[in-house]
Amino acid sequence: MQPPERIIRMRTVLHRTGLSRSSIYRKIAEGTFPPQLKIGTHGAGWHESAIDAWIADPAGWHRSAHRPRA
């Protein structure tokens, strides 16, 4: 049995990718960065596997190519 997918928050994404907050939002709008997941009324995060996939191949990542595991 696989462990459940981790959800990571903005601070962790900023640290792991080295991108700025505005660069992340721009890339999301362009479709070249994993979109956020709504995790609460005022909270959002990312599937850790989606961020790992982007870090492994930033130029080759595309929204339609990545489906996070459940």
Image (tube, rainbow, N blue to C red):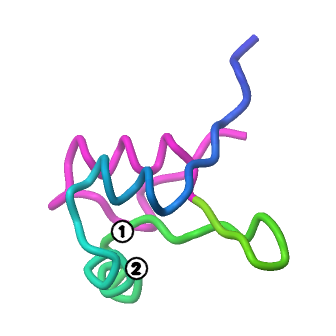
Q: Looking at this view, is 20 or 46 the one in front?
A: 20
Q: Are marks 1 and 2 in contact (CB under 8 Å)?
A: yes
Q: CA distance from mark 1 to mark 2?
A: 5 Å
User: Residue 40: horizontal and vertical position, in percent?
Assistant: 82, 69
Left or right of residue 34: residue 57 = left
User: Residue 52: horizontal and vertical position, in percent?
Assistant: 37, 41
Instruction: Name the residue furthest right.
Output: 41
Secondary structure state at the residue bearing disc 1: loop
Identify the residue under disc 1: 33
Q: Looking at this view, is 66 or 27 the one in front?
A: 27
Tell me the residue at 38%/83% (across/down).
25
User: Residue 28: horizontal and vertical position, in percent?
Assistant: 40, 79
- Name the amino acid type tagged 2: Ile
Tell me the residue at 34%/65% (across/down).
62
Left or right of residue 42: residue 27 = left
Is 61 in the magenta? yes
- Name the amino acid type tagged 1: Phe
The total number of labels drawn is: 2
Image: 60 above or below 5? below
Identify the residue under disc 2: 28
Q: Any mark on residue 49, and which?
A: none
Tell me the residue at 60%/61% (across/down).
45
Image: 52 above or below 30? above
Residue range in magenta is: 46-70
Indicate the quadrant containing the C terminus: top left, top right, bottom left or bottom right. top right
